[in-house]
């Protein structure tokens, strides 16, 4: 199964917005095969290509009619992972709608498995694994939370139409710790526009990196929250994060706050082909 990541430009002015969407793929030998910059949904679908892929998107692809936030955002809050609270009203007010919904449906119809991801969370997990690689002794959950709260991914995304170019190199270097970036594409644009493309590419590659991890890594290195209808989020994880998720999901379910599956780790939810 192929591993693809998408940075989806949410701006409804697809043709006029300065930024562009990006599609990246990570090969089975953990190398970037390329990044393609896109405008339309048709271009994105073409860049994803044929053959079944796990496609992770950094934008909402399911917007159920709920108040406040989706079940996945309730859980993320208790995992100390910031996420935009998704409701139809918020998506309409912030972006003019949810572009990812129709795109995800088209990709699923083409035979791909589609879910959401948070590139910042992926980058934080890469940072975490500098000091706590797979197989490290388990931490007490209170100690884990304190250490996790101290990690922040570099700020590199656009503010006011410009990428934070001082954060681009550190963010790209983080991705490069986990993926061979030899095939990183040459810049197609210069100045602020080039920085916007660089930021989009970093997000897409982070999503593709997580997709590759879900396909190849053991089930205690990633997890899935929710489902395709209510919102399905994939996270780079470690055993401590998985334990925290299960504890908080159980509590929130008992309170009646959420109705989300209790099993989250890869070994329980099965491989991406089964989602």
Image (cartoon, grey):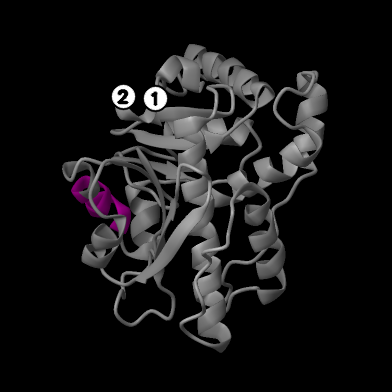
Q: Residue at x 73, y 50 (%)?
A: 152
Q: Which mark is residue 274?
A: 2
Does residue 264 show up?
no
Instruction: Name the image quarter holding the C terminus.
Output: top left
Q: Quadrant of residue 202?
A: bottom right
Crowd around label 1: few <14 · some 14–19 · many ≥20 (10 Å): few
Distance from the alpha carbon under mark 2 to that under mark 1: 6 Å
Instruction: Name the image quarter holding the N terminus.
Output: top left
Q: Residue at x 31, y 29 (%)?
A: 273
User: Marks 1 and 2: in contact by CB < 8 Å?
Assistant: yes
184 with respect to 64 (left or right):
right
SS at badge 2: helix
List x then y, in percent, for residue 60: 38, 48
Residue 104 highlighted magenta (yes or no): yes
Q: Residue at x 33, y 47 (%)?
A: 61
Which residues make up the magenta segment?
99-106
Q: Which residue is disc 1 drawn over?
A: 271
Residue 197 highlighted magenta (yes or no): no
């Amino acid at each position: 199964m192929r591993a693809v990541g998408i940075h989806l430009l949410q701006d409804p002015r697809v043709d006029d917005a300065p930024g562009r969407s990006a599609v990246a793929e990570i090969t089975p030998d953990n190398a970037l095969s390329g990044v393609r910059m896109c405008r339309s949904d048709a271009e994105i679908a073409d860049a994803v290509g044929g053959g079944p892929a796990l496609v992770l998107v950094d934008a909402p692809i399911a917007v159920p009619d709920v108040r406040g936030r989706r079940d996945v955002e309730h859980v993320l809050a208790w995992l100390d992972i910031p996420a935009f609270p998704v409701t139809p009203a918020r998506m309409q007010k912030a972006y003019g709608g949810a572009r990812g919904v129709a795109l995800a449906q088209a990709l699923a119809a083409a035979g791909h498995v589609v879910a959401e991801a948070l590139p910042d969370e992926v980058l934080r997990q890469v940072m975490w694994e500098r000091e706590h690689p797979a197989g490290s002794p388990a931490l007490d959950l209170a100690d884990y939370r304190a250490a996790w709260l101290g990690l922040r991914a570099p700020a590199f995304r656009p503010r006011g139409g410009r990428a934070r170019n001082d954060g681009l190199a550190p963010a790209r270097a983080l991705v490069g710790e986990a993926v061979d970036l030899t095939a990183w594409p040459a810049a197609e644009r210069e100045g602020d526009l080039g920085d916007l493309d660089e930021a989009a590419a970093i997000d897409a590659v982070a999503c593709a990196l997580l997709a590759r991890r879900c396909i190849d890594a053991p089930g205690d290195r990633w997890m899935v929250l929710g489902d395709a209808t209510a919102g399905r989020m994939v996270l780079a994880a470690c055993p401590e994060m998985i334990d925290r998720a299960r504890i908080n999901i159980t509590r929130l379910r008992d309170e009646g706050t959420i109705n989300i599956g209790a099993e989250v780790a890869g070994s329980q939810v099965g491989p991406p082909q089964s989602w």
